[in-house]
């Protein structure tokens, strides 16, 4: 889709000017004289993070340690693993390139990370009485990011972890003597039936208490999974359904707790900090991007030129999440009204859209040339079409026929077949992502930008969104490279990769040339028919 990017950039610059003017007016009015910056607010205060071992949680931990050098203890709620010491779990989380800058600039900061054995799917979060008392005495900020992000989870599991886990966290927070902010990380797609999706709570058809009661009752929980689609309503999966219920839990808790909800759109790898292209998993869109560059995926309906996706870099989400905690703790006016819980939609399509055409340009150009994979099995390219019948033809020739042939060869070589299993996973991922990529969502982002306006001037360098510096094609190529480097842990060698995919191109061209020659030879006797 050819869109007028100048129009979107003009809107971006307009909002940035408004933010700058708002800060200047607040500065002239002396608003910041008694207002702490983010590092000052977090100085010597303890933090609890759930989901710290996940993609977003890990980046959040790194950002806090790097930008708040005087931060107190960071408690990380981690599920116990048999035979693995808690300290070893922390080391596994931080022993990655993501934390290299922290090691260089603040080597003692990693010593502030303290694991707490717990499980958000358990009653009482699985905490011991001693740990529960410790957290309630010391913690001032809570970031609740623990959740099952699998779209195909059974409804019972999703409700117990995502919804009941939020309730149990709220109960923990009620006893916190020093609590200044509870940030609940949700998703921008909890209300996908709305247009636009505003920064407020929407009512749910099912009460969260009833959902937890059903999921917690062993005698009827099985029925919940079998009839899950009846409960979901407009929700495309159990993830958005259970997260919508979780928002209701937080909304009611906001009457007595300093709650704020952050709703990111589709979170992708980092654009700038601390590493361009940082991405430590291959879930959702990253799995598709990896499959394209490896030559596995060649036909996909998700990236039709007319499609429009709301990809938000993880470093931007982290900035907004920390600013949300700061704004809630310092009681900034986010224009919520009526004492309702503040909700922040972290989405940027209205100022920085990413079209399917841009994605195709990355796959067919910059991604292939700037980040070629030296272990690709076919020359990387991608075909797409809106008509399902055409996509099915592509799938048959480029996926099913190819996968069955490769698996047959593997069987004959006494090796485990694998490619058809990969294509089944790709099909499941396509189905999971299609509700979010086949249509355009419009998000209200007033509070998202208000966080920039009310931000302390001393935090501009650390927490400015910097969207005007984003470049979809360059950033996309960095994502593709980051998947190889960080998610797969493989060595990246551009020259070696280019030589490899060029060989694959000529081998494939020779194969199809030979195939055409054979077909022409065998069909020559019938040439008089046409």
Image (cartoon, rainbow, N blue to C red):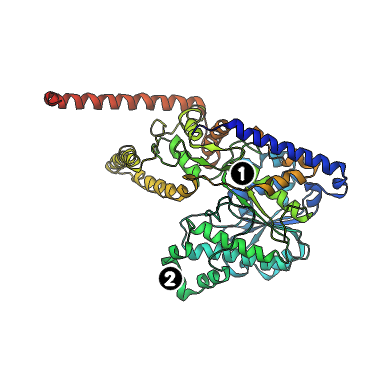
Q: Position of residue 347 (x, y in %)?
A: 61, 45
Q: Position of residue 266 (x, y in %)?
A: 55, 46
Q: Residues within 10 Å of mark 1 (few under 14, many from 20)?
A: many
Task: Please name the residue shown 42% across and 49% down the image.
Answer: 431
Q: Quadrant of residue 83?
A: bottom right
Q: Mark 2 and mark 1: span between their CA atoms?
A: 37 Å
Q: Position of residue 213 (x, y in %)?
A: 54, 73
Q: Position of residue 340 (x, y in %)?
A: 70, 61
How many callouts does the rendering have?
2
Task: Please name the residue shown 54% across and 61% down the image.
Answer: 242
Observer-nearest of 521 and 8: 8
Residue 314: assigned label: 1
Observer-nearest of 175 and 116: 175
Q: Is residue 462 visible?
A: yes
435 to 105, vertically: above or below: below
Q: Residues within 10 Å of mark 2 (few under 14, many from 20)?
A: some
Q: Which residue is mark 2?
A: 223
Q: Is residue 368 left or right of residue 116?
A: left
Task: Please name the residue shown 44% across and 37% down the image.
Answer: 292
């Amino acid at each position: 889709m050819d869109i007028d990017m100048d129009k979107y950039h003009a809107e971006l610059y307009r909002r940035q000017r408004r933010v700058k003017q708002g800060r200047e007016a607040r500065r002239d009015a002396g608003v910041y004289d008694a207002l702490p910056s983010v590092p000052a607010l977090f100085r010597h205060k303890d933090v609890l993070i759930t989901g710290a071992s996940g993609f977003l949680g890990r980046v959040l931990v790194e950002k806090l340690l790097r930008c708040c050098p005087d931060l107190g203890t960071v408690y990380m709620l981690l599920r116990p693993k048999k035979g693995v010491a808690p300290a070893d779990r922390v080391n596994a989380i931080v022993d990655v390139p993501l934390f290299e800058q922290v090691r260089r600039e603040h080597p003692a900061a990693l010593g502030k990370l303290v694991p707490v054995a717990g499980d958000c799917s358990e009653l009482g979060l699985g905490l011991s009485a001693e740990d529960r008392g410790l957290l309630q005495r010391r913690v001032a900020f809570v970031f609740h990011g623990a959740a099952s992000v699998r779209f195909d989870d059974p409804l019972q599991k999703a409700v117990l972890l995502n919804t009941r886990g939020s309730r149990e966290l709220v109960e923990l927070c009620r006893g916190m003597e020093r609590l200044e902010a509870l940030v609940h990380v949700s998703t921008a797609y909890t209300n996908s039936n709305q247009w636009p999706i505003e920064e407020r709570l929407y009512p749910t058809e099912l009460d969260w208490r009833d959902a937890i009661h059903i999921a917690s009752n062993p005698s009827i929980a099985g029925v919940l999974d079998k009839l899950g689609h009846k409960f979901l309503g407009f929700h495309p999966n159990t993830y958005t359904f259970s997260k919508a219920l979780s928002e209701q839990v937080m909304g009611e808790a906001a009457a007595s707790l300093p709650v704020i909800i952050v709703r990111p759109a589709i979170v992708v790898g980092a654009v700038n900090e601390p590493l361009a292209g940082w991405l430590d998993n291959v879930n959702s869109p990253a799995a598709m991007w990896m499959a394209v560059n490896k030559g596995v995926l060649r036909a996909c309906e998700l990236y039709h030129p007319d499609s429009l996706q709301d990809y938000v870099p993880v470093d931007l989400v982290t900035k907004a999440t920390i600013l949300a905690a700061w704004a809630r703790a310092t009681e900034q006016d986010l224009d919520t009204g009526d004492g309702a819980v503040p909700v922040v939609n972290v989405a940027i399509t209205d100022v920085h859209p990413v079209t399917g055409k841009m994605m195709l340009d990355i796959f067919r150009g910059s991604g292939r040339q700037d980040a070629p994979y030296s272990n690709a099995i076919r020359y990387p390219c991608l075909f797409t079409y809106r008509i399902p019948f055409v996509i099915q033809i592509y799938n048959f020739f480029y996926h099913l026929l190819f996968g069955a042939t490769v698996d047959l060869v593997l069987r004959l070589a006494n090796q485990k077949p694998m490619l058809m299993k990969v294509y089944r996973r790709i099909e499941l991922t396509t189905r999971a992502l299609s509700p979010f990529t086949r249509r355009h969502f419009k998000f209200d982002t007033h509070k998202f930008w208000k966080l920039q306006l009310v931000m302390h001037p001393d935090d501009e360098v650390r927490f400015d969104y910097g969207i005007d510096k984003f470049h979809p094609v360059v950033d996309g190529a960095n994502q593709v490279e980051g998947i190889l480097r960080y998610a797969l842990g493989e060595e990246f060698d551009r020259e070696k990769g280019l030589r490899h995919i060029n060989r694959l191109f000529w081998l494939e061209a020779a194969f199809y040339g030979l195939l055409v020659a054979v077909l022409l030879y065998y069909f020559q006797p019938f040439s008089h028919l046409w």
